[in-house]
Image (spheres, rainbow, N blue to C red):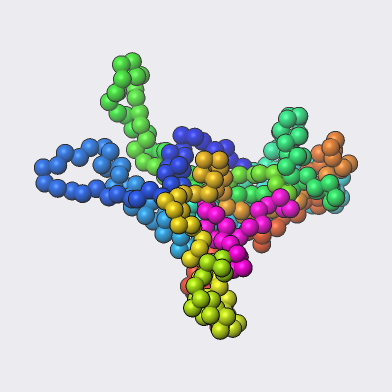
């Protein structure tokens, strides 16, 4: 829906390095502090808030961010119709614990996007390879969100290099922005493992870690029943969720997985019925051929929402 910008992802790699100890600036009389110290001060507070969101809240939608279609009903499913994909305003947390606050709707012309893919043989082939379910004749897409830096407020600065330009400028502010992406993925190919912490290894089932418990610990679990037992089992799983070596806090597959992939958080899945069946389908963009499922996403419930749920 929007294109990732490498220049706007300056904080992405650092946000994914959970194994790094955070350092704040120590202010002392007579100490010379420069630009690096100012950036370190901001980085400390920002990453501390990010880690709080990651470990204590998780990733998902807090409110809003509903994905919907906007199009006039043509009365049939054979005519091409202009279909817009819209994400409503809302609040959420991405896979690296970074808060997202979307103040206005975001929109993409789904037909134009699909047509651009369809006209490029390589792009369309990749879309079919990753998102086409032959049994149902459906092309599956997912809408994801993640935080992104956005430089703004360009101001003149002194040139730092010879011939750097007659009017050098630098951004005076970095805005908190959001990146929405459309990705081809069949639901059957989505990871089925339970990741309470999106960037780290799965939380292993109780049966896999039971042997690691002491005799007294196992006895406590066995003696409990109902919700109390479930809580103890989950606690035991969390005790053994990160490993015991100095790589325990390193993001899973840190050297193989793009940090952007770990940050992406699901908003919705979109099913598009093709005709005729792939691999050589004729592209028809029609709202009667498209379904959006918003309830597949992860949700984050605040204390007020949980209290209301308990009272109900």
Q: Residue at x 57, y 80 (%)?
A: 222
Q: Is residue 202 magenta?
A: yes
The vertical placement of 112 against 191, above or below, is above
Q: Residue at x 27, y 50 (%)?
A: 24
> Residue shown at 54%/76% (left/top)?
218
Q: Is residue 7 left or right of residue 46?
A: right
Coordinates of residue 281 in the picture (x, y in percent): 85, 38
Q: Quadrant of the C terminus?
A: bottom right
Residue 162 in view of the camera:
yes
Residue 235 versus residue 7: which sits nearer the camera? 235
Q: Residue drawn at (31%, 42%), measured in percent from left and top?
A: 39
Quarter of the N terminus within the rendering: top right
Residue 307: in sight, yes or no?
Answer: no
Give yes or no for residue 206 being in the magenta stretch: yes
Please tell me which residue lies in front, 57 or 20. 20
Q: Position of residue 44 (x, y in %)?
A: 33, 50
Q: Kindly indicate the quadrant of the structure image that contains residue 225.
A: bottom right
Q: Residue furthest front?
A: 215
Check the image and name the residue furthest to the left. Answer: 30
Above or below, comparing residue 55 to residue 116 in the picture: below
How many marks the image carries: the answer is 0
Main SS class of the magenta portion in the image: loop
Q: In screen coordinates, is 109 left or right of 167?
A: right
Q: Farthest residue in the top direction?
A: 163
Q: Is residue 76 above or below residue 209?
A: above
Q: Give x and y (percent) for residue 262.
A: 54, 48
- Per the rendered image, the range of residues in magenta is 187-208
Percent across and percent down for residue 132 are: 78, 44
């Amino acid at each position: 829906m929007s294109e990732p910008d490498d220049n706007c992802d300056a904080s992405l790699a650092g946000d994914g390095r959970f194994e790094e100890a955070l350092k704040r600036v120590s202010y002392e009389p007579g100490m010379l502090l420069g630009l690096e110290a100012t950036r370190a001060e901001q980085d400390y507070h920002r990453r501390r808030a990010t880690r709080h969101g990651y470990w204590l809240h998780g990733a998902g939608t807090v409110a809003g961010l509903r994905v919907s279609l906007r199009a006039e009903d043509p009365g049939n499913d054979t005519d091409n119709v202009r279909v817009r994909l819209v994400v409503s305003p809302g609040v959420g947390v991405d896979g690296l614990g970074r808060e997202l606050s979307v103040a206005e709707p975001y929109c993409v012309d789904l037909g134009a996007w699909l047509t651009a893919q369809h006209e490029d043989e390589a792009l369309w082939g990749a879309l079919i390879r990753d998102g086409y379910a032959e049994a149902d004749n459906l092309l599956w897409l997912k809408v994801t969100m993640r935080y992104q830096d956005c430089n703004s407020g360009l101001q003149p600065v002194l040139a730092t290099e010879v011939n750097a330009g007659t009017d050098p400028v630098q951004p005076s502010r970095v805005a908190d922005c959001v990146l929405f992406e459309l990705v081809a993925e069949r639901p059957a190919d989505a990871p089925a493992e339970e990741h309470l912490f999106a960037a780290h290894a799965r939380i292993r089932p109780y049966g896999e870690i039971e042997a690691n418990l002491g005799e007294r610990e196992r006895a406590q679990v066995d003696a409990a029943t109902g919700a109390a037992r479930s809580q103890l089992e989950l606690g035991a799983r969390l005790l053994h969720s990160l490993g015991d070596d100095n790589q325990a806090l390193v993001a899973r597959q840190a050297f193989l997985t793009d940090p952007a992939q770990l940050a992406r958080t699901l908003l919705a899945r979109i099913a598009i019925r093709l005709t005729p069946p792939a691999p050589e389908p004729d592209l028809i963009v029609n709202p009667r051929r498209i379904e959006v499922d918003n309830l597949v996403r992860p949700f984050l419930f605040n204390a007020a929402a949980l209290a209301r749920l308990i009272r109900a």
